[in-house]
Image: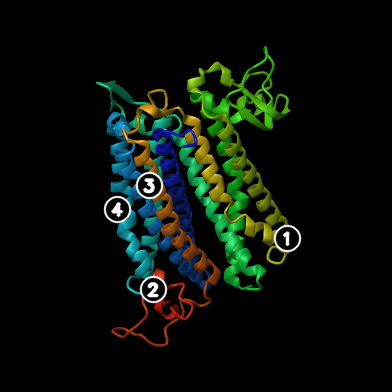
């Protein structure tokens, strides 16, 4: 069907499931740190706006965290079901790294998550804040180990191959492989930027509908400060990451640039737009800027960038896909920087909360961070092809021996279940966002003292239009 084989379906299935999964940890990482900042500001300033925002976003965080855990379990199982030969080859490296993630991060998050979500009326303020900080740290530790594993697959170090299996000989080299620091900073920063635009979009939605209050304004203000500061930093990190990729994965850079061959000693131009044709071995309709490719990728005006024709056809990534996925990521990055700069200009003129053109831009930029993450992930993973462990094991040699029919059925089931299950979850999260934060949500209860009935702070009850959960939050604890 469509010229696809069982291997292609296995790759599509993994790409489909990881595309769903990566969205949830990205927001979890950003929201966890955002919640820690909100609670810290509330403890420092006693401004109830921060407390109200904390309780509002903690409900969304809880739903998002649950969906991230469920979708992540599927990813782990696929290593054994669809990619068993990869697990046999490299499991002595990837298995321990994922185990360290569970031992150091997941247990930390799970241990303090209950206190964070349900302990507001049961523990002291400082202990609750400590729990929130621990959950935020846990999400970052989880990111550390997951990206250590993925980065090792991109730039493997610290190993020997014995009897056809990878044996780790230097765990520091395995973990801190050449691409790991750049990949970790790039992904963590992307999570913060994506969360900032998610929060900012939520605030813009309410402001455009006339709901103007201190909580909504604080949401937009904090989000735009984050965009202004972090989006340009992300661009710098991306530049360093690109230089690292040029050194260790030159074929990926050539595919990203749609650059097929060098001419004499001429510097490499930058192809802004075009259509890389893998069969014809050229980029059609190319719009080029002379010298700029060399300047961006080598920081010089005379050095050349490796070209795709320097690599055997079977070793070339699919330039058609990564050429455009990379440009989507970069284009959205420039839009994020522009949004942050515009917000600063409006802030100085006291029009940040009233300029409707800007608010519409902030609204539509809501999913931009997540789309950029997906585009960057496609660039990274498809650009690594045809290798599952770069230079050591090809993707075609890593898959299990499943038939086309088996992979077709399981892929169809994944599509149906994921869109049904996570579609409901995403819809519920958006419903929470539409409700917005309640003002004075943490006010002292008028009833429900010690030993008396009170409404629990249940995240899944937050979207009940008829329910009033304000009295579940005890300001005095």
Residue 81, picture quadrant? top left
Position of 331 with respect to 384 (left or right) is right
- Please, what secondary structure does the residue beneath circle 1 have? helix
Cα distance between the residues tagged 3 and 2: 27 Å
Q: Which mark is residue 107?
A: 4
- Please, what secondary structure does the residue beneath circle 4 have? helix
> Which of the two discs, 4 and 3, labels the residue nearer the N terminus?
4
Colour setting: rainbow
> Which of the two discs, 2 and 4, labels the residue nearer the N terminus?
4
Q: Position of residue 236 (x, y in %)?
A: 59, 38
Position of 157 with respect to 290 (left or right) is left
Q: Residue at x 60, y 37 (%)?
A: 324
> Which of the two discs, 3 and 1, labels the residue nearer the N terminus?
3
User: Is label 1 in contact with label 2 (beta carbons under 8 Å)?
Assistant: no
Residue indicated by mark 1: 357
Q: Position of residue 10 (x, y in %)?
A: 39, 38
Residue indicated by mark 2: 457
> Which of the two discs, 3 and 2, labels the residue nearer the N terminus?
3
């Amino acid at each position: 069907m469509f010229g696809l084989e069982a291997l292609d379906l296995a790759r599509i299935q993994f790409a489909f499931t990881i595309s769903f999964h990566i969205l949830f940890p990205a927001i979890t990482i950003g929201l966890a740190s955002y919640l820690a900042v909100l609670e810290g500001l509330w403890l420092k300033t006693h401004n109830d706006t921060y407390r109200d925002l904390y309780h509002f976003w903690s409900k969304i965080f809880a739903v998002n965290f649950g969906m991230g855990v469920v979708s992540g379990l599927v990813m782990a199982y696929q290593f054994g079901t669809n990619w068993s030969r990869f697990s046999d080859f490299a499991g002595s490296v990837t298995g321990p790294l994922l185990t360290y993630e569970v031992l150091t991060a997941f247990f930390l998050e799970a241990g303090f998550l209950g206190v964070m979500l349900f302990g507001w009326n049961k523990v002291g303020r400082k202990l609750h804040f400590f729990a929130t900080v621990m959950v935020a740290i846990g999400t970052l530790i989880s990111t550390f180990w997951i990206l250590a594993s993925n980065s090792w697959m991109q730039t493997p170090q610290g190993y020997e191959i014995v009897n056809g299996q990878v044996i780790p000989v230097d765990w520091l080299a395995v973990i801190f492989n050449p691409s790991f620091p750049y990949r970790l900073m790039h992904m963590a920063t992307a999570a913060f930027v994506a969360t900032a635009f998610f929060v900012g979009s939520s605030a813009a939605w309410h402001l455009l509908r006339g709901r103007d209050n201190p909580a909504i304004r604080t949401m937009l203000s904090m989000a735009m400060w984050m965009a202004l500061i972090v989006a340009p930093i992300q661009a710098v990190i991306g530049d360093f990451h690109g230089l690292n990729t040029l050194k260790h994965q030159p074929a990926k850079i050539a595919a990203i640039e749609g650059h097929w061959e060098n001419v004499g000693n001429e510097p490499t131009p930058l192809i802004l737009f075009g259509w890389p044709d893998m069969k014809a071995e050229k980029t059609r309709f190319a719009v080029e800027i002379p010298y700029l490719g060399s300047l961006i990728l080598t920081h010089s005006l005379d050095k050349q960038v490796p070209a795709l024709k320097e690599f055997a056809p079977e070793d070339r990534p699919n330039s058609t896909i990564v050429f455009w996925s990379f440009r989507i990521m970069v284009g959205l990055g420039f839009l994020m920087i522009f949004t942050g700069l515009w917000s600063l200009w409006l802030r100085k003129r006291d029009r940040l909360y009233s300029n409707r053109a800007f608010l519409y831009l902030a609204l539509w930029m809501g999913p931009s961070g997540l789309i950029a993450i997906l585009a960057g992930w496609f660039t990274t993973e498809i650009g690594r092809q045809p290798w599952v462990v770069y230079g050591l094991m090809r993707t075609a040699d890593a898959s299990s021996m499943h038939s086309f029919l088996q992979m077709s059925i399981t892929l169809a089931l994944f599509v149906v279940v994921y869109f049904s299950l996570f579609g409901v979850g995403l819809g519920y999260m958006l419903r929470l966002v539409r409700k917005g934060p309640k003002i004075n949500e943490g006010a002292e209860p008028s009833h429900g003292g010690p030993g008396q009935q009170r409404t629990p702070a249940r995240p899944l009850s937050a979207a009940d239009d008829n329910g009033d959960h304000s009295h579940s939050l005890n300001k005095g604890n």
